[in-house]
Amino acid sequence: MARLVMKFGGTSVADIDRIRNVARHVKREVEAGYEVAVVVSAMSGKTNELVGWTRALAPMHDAREYDAVVASGEQVTSGLLAIALQEIGINARSWQGWQIPIKTDGAHGAARIVDIDGSKLVERLAQGQVAVIAGFQGIGPDNRIATLGRGGSDTSAVAIAAAIGAERCDIYTDVDGVYTTDPRIVPKAKRLDRVSYEEMLEMASLGAKVLQVRSVELAMVHGVRTFVRSSFDDPADPRLGDPRNPPGTLICDEDEIVEKQVVTGIAYSKDEAQISLREVADKPGVAAAVFVPLAEANINVDMIVQNVSEDGTTTDMTFTVPTTDFDRALKVLEGARAAIGYVNIQGSGDLVKVSVIGIGMRSHAGVAASAFKALASKGINIRAITTSEIKISILIDSAYAELAVRTLHSLYGLDAA
Ligand code: ASP
Ligand code: MG
């Protein structure tokens, strides 16, 4: 029989009524003939509350005890949903990460899954029992509970889908799919029917907050077809059970996408800061002198632009860091001034990165040129540009963010009619 993973996020299990509603979604799929493994988050707000308690006691708390505390939110919802399912006549039991087991590395608070033994789950599923699994948690090499980082139940769900060979991993959330851009900025944004893993990875890491980035990486590596859909739809709506065209967005291999758009979506990320080093000596080792100290200070550098120097003696180097690390980065670079040897340093803390994403770009010329032209016509100044095969990112002043997103969204024909 085909297996299905259904994952429900915090707003989908926010209270007892919502949990009853989730049970009805699960019942629908059981009745459609699937063996179902459910993965649940904590009730919305719960994890924040638990994190707050550990911080209140000690800001530099023991990470193993942090995990013991914050993993409890998911334990509660797994038990509650199992009860709700039993109440409507569905055979179900809860599973904690250690019971499966979901083995992780030892990085408490941000652990990575290293192995899932799906055999016990598969056995119970075959007996007709729904598995209700606590997301976000596993067991570390020290035999203690480890959590996967905020938003980690998406990753739990995809990893379990891979481990049990599920036909699909359905991610139920409070939106009904992935949109061409943020609908709060562009009300004409459209829901996408299909997005490739690569495109979704770009969108997720660029600020489209639907899925934890790591879950998309995992889905891509293991080829787990991941379907983003809403738990707020009526569980009895006949369209939801339609396997050909249920409402939502399928994240899948690009081979499954027949009509490849040149541009699939426009993503943006706020809180970017730019730093420019002027008249840096143009010789081997300079880039290392700049970026090694930043890496050692745990500052994540994103866009990097370096000029070719005219006379081969000095050059300019521009890059971006998160706004929250801006002041720290300036300090680190001032400290390393002698080693780097720049003449002056300039920075700007209030920028946004807008990105145009689409697998069709690989085979289409002129996408970047048309974007630059459209932005110029609106008087938007571009501070830096980076590109990959399927993405163009531009750095602009934050005051122009919405105008830029709207302009590019219409330019590539993404506006709904
Ligand atoms: N409850 C955890 C969090 O809020 C994990 C999740 O919901 O994905 O980060
Ligand atoms: Mg989430």
Image (tube, rainbow, N blue to C red):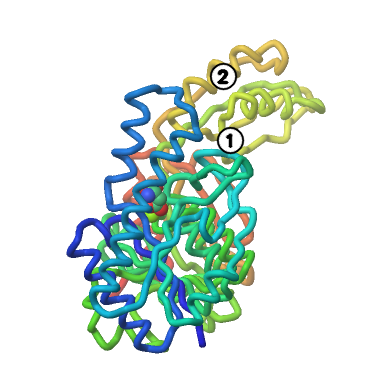
Near mark 2 (Cα within 10 A), the count class, few <14, some 14-19 or many ≥20, is some
Which of the two discs, 1 and 2, labels the residue nearer the N terminus?
1
Disc 1 designates what residue?
A: 301
Q: Left or right: 287 with respect to 356?
A: right
Q: Residue at x 35, y 23 (%)?
A: 57
Q: Position of residue 70 (x, y in %)?
A: 39, 42
Give the amino acid type for the residue marked by disc 1 in the picture: Val
Q: Residue at x 62, y 55 (%)?
A: 388
Compared with 32, 80 (above or below) is: above
Near mark 1 (Cα within 10 A), the count class, few <14, some 14-19 or many ≥20, is some
The answer to whether one can see residue 215 in this image is yes
Q: Position of residue 203 (x, y in %)?
A: 47, 57
Return the residue nearer the eye: 258 or 80: 80
Disc 2 designates what residue?
A: 345
Return the residue nearer the eye: 321 or 103: 103
Residue furthest toward the left?
17
Label 1: which secondary element: loop
The quadrant holding residue 320 is: top right
Return the residue nearer the eye: 161 or 139: 139
Q: Residue at x 20, y 57 (%)?
A: 15
Which part of the image, by quadrant, shows the C terminus?
A: bottom left
Residue behind label 2 places its C-beta within 8 angstroms of ligand 1: no
